[in-house]
Image (tube, helix red, strand yellow):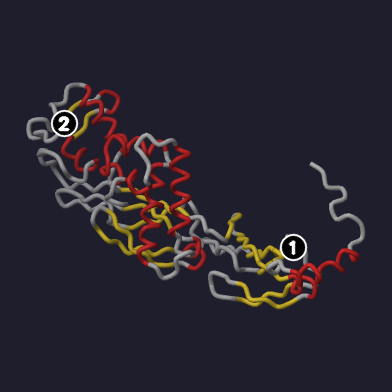
Amino acid sequence: MPERNLYDILGVARTAAPDEIKKAYRRLAKKYHPDVNPGNKAAEEKFKEVTAASEVLSDPKKRSLYDEFGPDSLRSGFDEKKADAYRQWKRQGAPAGGMPFDFGDYESVNVGDYGSFDFGDLFGQIFGGRGGRARARRGPVAGAHAEAEITIDLKDAVTGAERDVRLDGRTLRVKIPPGVTDGAQIRLAGQGGEGSHGGPAGDLYLRVRLRDHPLVRRDGKDLTIDLPVTVPEAALGAEVTMPTFEGPVKLRVPAGAQSGTRLRLRGKGLPDLRGAGRGDLYAVVRIVLPESDGRLAEAVRPLAGLYKGDPRAGLSL
């Protein structure tokens, strides 16, 4: 997650409306998307930065926590319920300035509906270990499980990948299995909160978010891409080359293909994590005219007589 102010990353004010945030992200994502800047590492990093900022500021709950707690709310061990307890503790008379606080004299405090909390442990989880002294507990205590998000490209979900993820100053190597879907979780054992008194570390659960692709659309396990086709290729039929996430393939365009014709490539969609087969990739024919000049007009004028009736007949809304 970026260390810079998220509002500055998107170039919006802290009071920006949701629509302003969405527009700012779309403008920057279009500018820095890796498919528009192939091989440009700086643009790729910028794209990741604006995407991460948008994911927080576009979510009302995450934005509210960020506005209140700043970058601490983005840490993998942040606990919202304990943050609520911290708010209540402050309302009930926390010392001016909040932190630092001497936890040596206050091992735990009752905070109403939340029960009794060990504030040394509380601040260790919601503020990455900053806080006062908490009395030692007896016996080993397992570390808390942590959650975070990882945003991946659609290609990673199709082919699988390994990616480095920066979390709380650590670089973690994450293996992304083929077929992972939006909202799925990837478990990293022992990468959560540290245990105490010899207890084991908790696990880190990465919730997957699939980044929208500028050219490919998803529908479950099926993928769809527009396929530009020339007028002669559509009229006469042709074998064309089209891209897939696993490399280019040959595809036969039938003679007389119309714009909107869907051509299916079996088994070129998203895999299934449970091994239930792959989806399909659909290429939608989009007929492209050449650049307009006098020769184009001369060439197509005779085609008018080949139409049988008005092609818009029966069109109504």
Residue at 57% in and 70% down: 244
Residue at 14% in and 49% down: 197
Q: Taking 192 as reference, is 228 left or right?
A: right
- Residue wearing tag 1: 261
Q: Secondary structure at mark 1?
A: loop
- Whichever of labels 1 and 2 marks the residue nearer the N terminus, that label is 2
Image position of 194 with respect to 222: above or below: above
Residue at 70% in and 69% down: 290
Q: Amino acid at mark 2?
A: Gly
Mark 2 closeness class: few <14, some 14–19, many ≥20 residues within 10 Å = few
Quarter of the image where one finds residue 236: bottom right
Nearest the eye: 8 or 261? 8
Image x and y of residue 150, in percent? 39, 55
Q: Taking 147 as reference, is 278 left or right?
A: right
Image x and y of residue 98, in percent? 16, 31
- Residue wearing tag 2: 98
Nearest the eye: 182 or 43? 43
Q: Taking 291 as reference, is 137 left or right?
A: left
Q: Secondary structure at mark 2?
A: loop
Q: Pointer 1 and pointer 2: residues touching (CB < 8 Å)?
A: no
Mark 1 closeness class: few <14, some 14–19, many ≥20 residues within 10 Å = some
